[in-house]
Image (cartoon, rainbow, N blue to C red):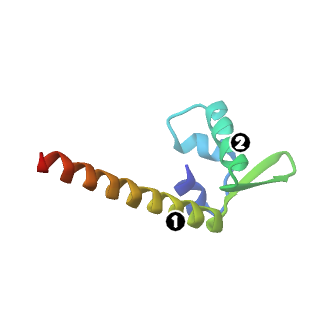
Amino acid sequence: MLDLIAEQGEATATSLAVRLPVSRQAIVKHLAVLDAAGLVTAARVGREVRYAVRPDALDATARWMSALASEWDRRLAALKRIAESG
């Protein structure tokens, strides 16, 4: 969904529903979660709500996820060393 919004620059729930195999209602709920998480912005234009990706928030999220993955890799490597030494 984020890829589609980024690809279009901005998107409405209706425009996303045409391209995704889920209901418009499910898309609206997902967009509300993304908005609450700060990953998209929502702007009302007439009767439509248009969503746009917040690249800065996505970059921060990607950095956090990368750091978390590195920490888990370190922990799993330590566990592997312990398991193989015994």
Crowd class of label 1 (few under 14; some 14 to 19; many from 20; radius 10 Å): few
- CB within 8 Å, label 1 to label 2: no
In the displayed structure, 58 sits above or below 28; it is below
Could you say which quadrant of the image residue 74 lies in? bottom left
Crowd class of label 2 (few under 14; some 14 to 19; many from 20; radius 10 Å): some
Question: Residue drawn at (29%, 51%), measured in percent from left and top?
Answer: 76
The Cα–Cα distance between marks 1 and 2, rounded to whole angstroms, is 23 Å
- Residue 48: x and y in percent read 80, 47
> Which amino acid type is shown beneath numbered disc 2?
Ala
**Frontmost residue, 61 versus 53:** 61
Give the foreground label among 1 and 2.
1
Question: Residue drawn at (17%, 45%), measured in percent from left and top?
Answer: 83
Q: Which residue is mark 2?
A: 32
- Give left or right: position of 48 versus 35: right
Q: Which residue is mark 1?
A: 63
Mark 2 or mark 1, which is nearer the start of the sequence? 2
Of all residues, the one furthest to the front in this rendering is 86
- Residue 79: x and y in percent read 26, 49
- Residue 10: x and y in percent read 67, 59
**Frontmost residue, 77 versus 40:** 77
- As drawn, the label of residue 28 is none
Figure label count: 2
> Which amino acid type is shown beneath numbered disc 1?
Arg
- Give left or right: position of 42 versus 17: right
**Frontmost residue, 34 versus 77:** 77
Question: Residue drawn at (13%, 49%), measured in percent from left and top?
Answer: 84
- Residue 46: x and y in percent read 87, 50
**Frontmost residue, 43 versus 67:** 67
Q: Secondary structure at mark 1?
A: helix
For the C terminus, the quadrant is: top left
Q: Secondary structure at mark 2?
A: helix
